Image (tube, grey):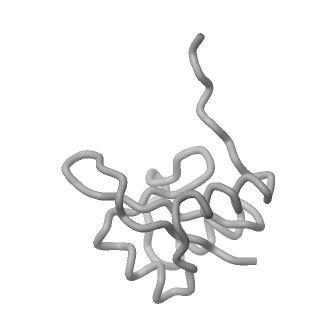
Amino acid sequence: MTLYIDPPTWPGHGRLWSHLVSDESFEELHAFAERIGVPTHAFDRDHYDLPAHRHPDAVRAGAVEVGSKELLRRLTEAGLRRPKHRRV
């Protein structure tokens, strides 16, 4: 049971963002996010979006820093990946 966070390199709304995921369950992910004060509206399908200034909070609380590709691999292998539906 581990939480993972990627570097804050994703641009949006004038900021850089990280993704926070679990390799165990959404329950674990939600509990961790609540513990560090991440609002529920930051949850997006299978991860939480954290602004760059919150990245250190997640790491101090125990999230493991990994690259974005590694984060996606772990999320997918855990069976927790919920991709956006693509329009054809």
Residue closer to the observer: 73 or 63: 73
Which residue is at a point 64% across and 66% down the rendered structure image?
29
Q: Position of residue 39 (x, y in %)?
A: 43, 61
Which residue is at a point 39% across and 74% down the rendered structure image?
55
Q: Position of residue 20 (x, y in %)?
A: 53, 64
Residue closer to the observer: 50 or 5: 5
Q: Quadrant of residue 27?
A: bottom right
Q: Quadrant of residue 4?
A: bottom right
Q: Position of residue 11 (x, y in %)?
A: 30, 50
Residue closer to the observer: 87 or 24: 87
Which residue is at a point 59% across and 74% down the rendered structure image?
32
Q: Identify whether 57 is placed above or below 70.
A: below
Which residue is at a point 57% across and 80% down the rendered structure image?
64
Residue closer to the observer: 74 or 21: 74
Q: Identify whether 41 is placed above or below 74.
A: above
In the image, farthest residue toward the left: 14
Q: Quadrant of residue 86?
A: top right
Q: Identify whether 14 is placed above or below 70.
A: above
Image quarter hosting the C terminus: top right
Q: Position of residue 42 (x, y in %)?
A: 45, 54
Count of labels shown?
A: 0
